[in-house]
């Protein structure tokens, strides 16, 4: 079993309720060009049928206007539900990003502290080595000391 990296967005999507999933699906359908095209086609067919013969909804298509008003009311509510969910998702994602940044800052500060300790240790080792080199006196192998 492999250890998959954590995907916050996927985890959040898996925790949605049935109503939240339905709102997302309806938002995606109603916000598509397919819906717009099919709705325009439906209205054109409705107007054509009701204009060419005596039908159930003669011009000025009062029944069609009623359906359009009801659809607009439902779409408004569905879009508000989806927008509210998107706001909650954005707020949760922002909090997750903040928490990640705080944890990264703590890690970076710890690494910088370790780095500062290493620099101090290297300087101390350099001092010790210069001190040992000074105590050893002149070199007999012909090499010169460097500081």
Image (tube, rainbow, N blue to C red):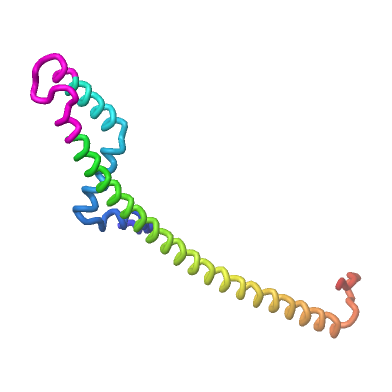
Q: Nearer the viewer, residue 21 or 141?
A: 21
Above/below status of 22 relative to 62: below
Q: Nearer the viewer, residue 21 or 145?
A: 21
Q: Residue at x 26, y 38 (%)?
A: 29
Q: Quadrant of residue 43?
A: top left
Q: Nearer the viewer, residue 14 or 30?
A: 30
Q: Residue at x 78, y 80 (%)?
A: 127
Number of numbered callouts drawn: 0
Q: Quadrant of the N terminus?
A: bottom left
Q: Specify the segment rendered in magenta.
A: 48-66
Q: Nearer the viewer, residue 30 or 117?
A: 30
Q: Position of residue 38 (x, y in %)?
A: 24, 27
Q: Residue at x 9, y 21 (%)?
A: 55
Q: Residue at x 34, y 58 (%)?
A: 88
Q: Position of residue 44 (x, y in %)?
A: 22, 22
Q: Quadrant of residue 91?
A: bottom left
Q: Would you say residue 121 is visible in this rendering?
A: yes
Q: Position of residue 107 (x, y in %)?
A: 53, 70
């Amino acid at each position: 079993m492999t250890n998959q990296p954590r995907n916050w967005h996927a985890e959040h999507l898996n925790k949605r309720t049935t109503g939240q999933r339905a709102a997302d699906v309806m938002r995606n359908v109603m916000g598509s060009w397919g819906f717009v095209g099919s709705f325009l086609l439906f209205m054109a067919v409705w107007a054509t049928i009701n204009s060419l013969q005596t039908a159930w909804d003669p011009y000025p298509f009062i029944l069609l206007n009623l359906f359009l008003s009801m659809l607009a009311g439902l779409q408004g509510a569905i879009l508000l539900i989806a927008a509210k969910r998107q706001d909650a998702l954005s707020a949760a994602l922002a909090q997750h990003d903040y928490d990640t940044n705080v944890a990264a800052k703590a890690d970076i500060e710890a690494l910088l502290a370790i780095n500062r300790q290493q620099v101090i240790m290297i300087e101390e080792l350099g001092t010790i080595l210069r001190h040992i080199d000074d105590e050893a006196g002149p070199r007999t192998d012909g090499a010169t000391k460097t500081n």
